[in-house]
Image: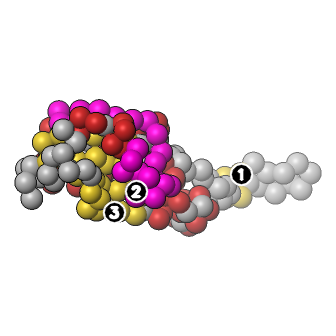
Amino acid sequence: MTPSTWILVCDASRALLFHNKDRGKGLEQFQALDHPDSRAHVRDLMTDAQGRKPVGPVPARSGNGSSGAHGRPGAAPDTDPKEVEAQKFARELAALLEKGLNAHAYERLFLVAPPQFLGTMRDTMSHQVSKHLEATVDKDLTNMTVPEITKRLEESFPTALA
């Protein structure tokens, strides 16, 4: 593949990668990725490993005179499971961008993502990939059809096609 411009349109659960292989000839989608775990319900992402853990003696209840017993209270997760899945997908996308850069598949990179995931992507990308990032748009276009996305990208990034 000749060096080109890549445009990554993504959210926490799906991504579309476009390029302008031949400058001035428009954009073409060449890859789609899906991360269904980011769309799952939190309860489906939780495992029993985070469930209940013994923590030691529980104070005796008043009036029954029994000594304390060991309790098993629920343990809350340290991080939101949906955020964990979003970070996993961001790392997967960052690795893809790094691989493309190392293969000299693109010279310039444009990124379109909802604000929160855009921040996650920026935090996840390597310094080398970040140096090729020319512009970002904080919008979620992933629910549009490919022709609609292409039209919006051509409007948002006219320099990507030059």
Q: Earlier in the sequence, mark 1 or mark 2?
A: 1
Q: Which residue is mark 3?
A: 32
Which numbered disc, 1 or 3, marks the residue closer to the eye?
Answer: 3
Residue located 71% across and 58% down the image: 69
Residue located 28% across and 62% down the image: 31
Q: Which residue is mark 1?
A: 58
> Does residue 53 appear to the left or right of 99 in the view shown?
right
Give the Cα separation between the discs numbered 2 and 3: 14 Å
Residue located 22% across and 47% down the image: 6
The segment highlighted magenta reads 129-152
* Depth order, front residue of 134/56: 134
- Where is residue 104? Give x, y as percent: 7, 50
Furthest toward the front, the residue is 25
> Does residue 141 appear to the left or right of 57 in the view shown?
left
- Where is residue 111? Give x, y as percent: 32, 41
The image quadrant of residue 121 is top left
> Does residue 48 appear to the left or right of 86 in the view shown?
right
Q: Earlier in the sequence, mark 1 or mark 3?
A: 3
Looking at the rendered structure, the kind of residue marked 1 is Val
Looking at the rendered structure, the kind of residue marked 2 is Pro
Label 1 secondary element = strand
Give the Cα separation between the discs numbered 1 and 2: 62 Å
